[in-house]
Image: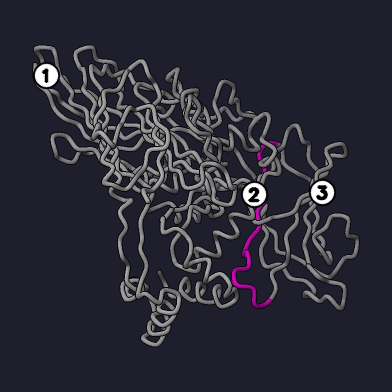
């Protein structure tokens, strides 16, 4: 935690002291944030944000903005509001009849064990504090947690997914293995499995499934992509959503192929900088000084992407479009330094700028204002990267396995499939504003590695990962409050013949089983069960033992 984060926490609690009692009474489960956010969750999310600021961690299963949501599980399993996705089976890049496998999967509840964190340890982990600030932080911690600290635990589990690969032929077999997992781009660091072969770490590369079905090769330059036949995994509601995505192999095939290339598509950029205008003054009737940019275009022949602009006007009948932004005022922390129109197709015309007292398009009162404009021609890939993607790459650059080329290609894919470059843009993207949502939604990824299985011999490949729970938000007051769900699939998306699959539960005395179809029986110490390959989906729903 840095200095700014700490001071923000302190101010949040000082401004809302009644939250302290609530913090002390919340469950001690630590839950990292999930990314997808739905509007109806607003009240829950706001509470979670305040509570999270209070204790420096996410507690009590209340989602922050961006939490992945949707119903999860069918069969006889529960429908959870937040579905984390199943554990998937290993597959081969190319089928090989000589290779069979025995799968042993372990679900370990070690992260559920409570760990004591003293106030001194919490403060010692805070970065960039002066001695005085560190002392103040310790005093504040002691006030929040008068027992000297708090207990911390997680509702994640540790999954060990081991495969004994056997070569039944009389020749060595070198195969490309693919281990799938669900993750968004910005949570790869939390969800990325580790692969080992006979205990030694494997060298892997990351293959990333598209936001949707995706596109192959370079774009032909025509306006409108064609996502026909693709599956949108925007909100994964259940394991069946992944089944629809993976069943015919198309999604994996595209993940193994090239991403779209927009470097050959011409683009025209209009770049606006150094805006000026009459300052904000409520008494003078200038509550939100704004610059509007208006222009003419043929809506069928031109698409306009934007950065920085936050208001728009669209008059298709008369061939007019407008974009607007608030003029930065003195003292603003992060005023936008430039605003850009990225034009694809025919150029726009009759461009004009004008200042207004507010950003509302029904406002007619003008002000003295202006802005510097630059027009230049480039290609679409360069425009998107230099004007938008490069700066945001800094937020994802540390995600393991993710390359800059993958990041840009997936952004292009998103624009072609659902953004303004598609034939039928999704409603939330049809205004042309560039978004980073493509990096925040769940998709299926694969770790790729080379494995040699000796003639007539066997090797053991093990995937180790941390798996998040499916759950209902506390604020929803459902029957599943306090219940965590985990599930796996036995053969979905896999061409590997498994002669045997077993599952082992390491409960560590932490759980009570509420619902399941595994067959575990904790009272009678039945912790290992055989899985039926004809049973494609297994689920386990538990609550913390009292």
As measured in the structure, the alpha-carbon distance from the residue carrying label 2 to the one carrying label 1 is 56 Å
Q: Is residue 262 at all visible to an observer of this figure?
A: no
- Bounds of the magenta segment: 330-345
Question: Looking at this view, is 382 or 520 the one in front?
Answer: 520
| In front: label 2 or label 1 | 1
Query: In the rendered structure, does residue 334 fall within the stretch colored magenta?
Result: yes
Which residue does the image show at 65% across and 53% down from the upper left? Answer: 340
Instruction: From the image, tell me which residue sits under label 3.
Output: 350
- Labelled pair 2, 1 in contact (Cβ < 8 Å): no
Question: Looking at this view, is 370 or 247 the one in front?
Answer: 247
Helix, strand or loop at label 3? It is strand
244 with respect to 305 (left or right): left
Q: Quadrant of the N terminus?
A: bottom left
Label ID, residue 486? none
Q: Residue furthest bottom?
A: 132
Instruction: From the image, tell me which residue sits under label 2.
Output: 269
Which residue does the image show at 63% across and 61% down from the upper left? Answer: 338
Helix, strand or loop at label 2? It is strand
Residue 367, placed above or below residue 500: below
Instruction: From the image, tell me which residue sits under label 1.
Output: 172
As measured in the structure, the alpha-carbon distance from the residue carrying label 3 to the one carrying label 1 is 69 Å
Which residue does the image show at 40% across and 77% down from the upper left? Answer: 146
């Amino acid at each position: 935690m840095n200095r700014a984060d700490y001071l923000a926490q302190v101010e949040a609690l000082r401004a809302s002291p009644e939250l302290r009692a609530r913090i002390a009474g919340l469950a001690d489960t630590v839950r990292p944030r999930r990314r997808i956010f739905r509007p109806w969750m607003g009240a829950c999310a706001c509470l979670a944000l305040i509570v999270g600021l209070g204790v420096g961690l996410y507690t009590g299963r209340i989602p922050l903005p961006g939490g992945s949501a949707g119903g999860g599980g069918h069969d006889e399993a529960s429908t959870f509001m937040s579905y984390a996705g199943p554990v998937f089976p290993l597959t081969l890049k190319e089928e090989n009849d000589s290779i069979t496998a025995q799968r042993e999967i372990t679900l370990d509840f070690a992260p559920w064990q409570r760990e004591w964190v003293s106030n001194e340890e919490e403060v010692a982990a805070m970065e960039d504090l002066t001695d005085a600030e560190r002392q103040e932080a310790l005093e504040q911690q002691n006030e929040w947690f008068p027992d000297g600290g708090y207990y911390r635990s997680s509702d994640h589990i540790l999954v060990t997914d081991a495969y004994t690969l056997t070569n039944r032929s009389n020749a060595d077999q070198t195969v490309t293995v693919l281990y799938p997992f669900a993750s968004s781009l910005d949570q790869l660091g939390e969800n990325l499995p580790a692969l080992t072969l006979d205990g030694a770490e494997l060298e892997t590369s990351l293959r990333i499934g598209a936001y949707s079905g995706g596109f192959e090769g370079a774009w032909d330059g025509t306006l409108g992509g064609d996502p026909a036949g693709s599956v949108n995994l925007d909100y994964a509601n259940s394991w069946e959503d992944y089944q629809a995505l993976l069943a015919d192999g198309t999604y994996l095939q595209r993940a193994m192929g090239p991403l779209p290339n927009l470097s050959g598509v011409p683009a025209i950029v209009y770049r606006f900088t150094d805006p000026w205008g009459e300052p904000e003054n409520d008494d003078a009737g200038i509550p939100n000084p704004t610059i509007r940019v208006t222009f003419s275009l043929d809506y069928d022949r031109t698409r306009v992407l934007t950065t920085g602009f936050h208001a728009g006007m669209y008059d298709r009948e008369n061939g007019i479009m407008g974009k607007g932004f608030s003029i930065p005022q003195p003292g603003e922390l992060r005023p936008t330094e430039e605003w850009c129109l990225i034009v694809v197709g025919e150029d726009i015309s009759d461009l004009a700028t004008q200042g207004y007292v507010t950003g509302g398009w029904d406002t007619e009162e003008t002000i003295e204002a202006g802005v510097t404009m630059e027009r230049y021609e480039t290609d679409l890939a360069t425009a998107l990267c230099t004007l938008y993607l490069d700066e945001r790459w800094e937020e994802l650059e540390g995600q393991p396995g993710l390359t800059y080329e993958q990041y840009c290609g997936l952004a292009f894919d998103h624009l072609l499939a659902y953004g303004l470059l598609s034939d039928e843009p999704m409603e939330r993207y049809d205004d042309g504003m560039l978004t980073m949502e493509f990096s925040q939604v769940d998709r299926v990824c694969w770790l790729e590695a080379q494995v040699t299985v000796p003639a007539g011999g066997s090797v053991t490949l093990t995937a180790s990962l941390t798996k998040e729970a499916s759950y209902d938000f506390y604020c929803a007051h459902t029957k599943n409050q306090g219940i965590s769900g985990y599930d796996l699939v036995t053969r979905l998306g896999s061409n590997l013949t498994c002669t045997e699959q077993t599952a082992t539960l390491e409960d560590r005395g932490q759980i009570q089983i509420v619902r399941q179809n595994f067959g575990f029986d904790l009272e009678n110490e039945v912790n290992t069960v055989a899985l039926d390959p004809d049973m494609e989906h297994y689920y386990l729903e538990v609550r913390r033992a009292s």
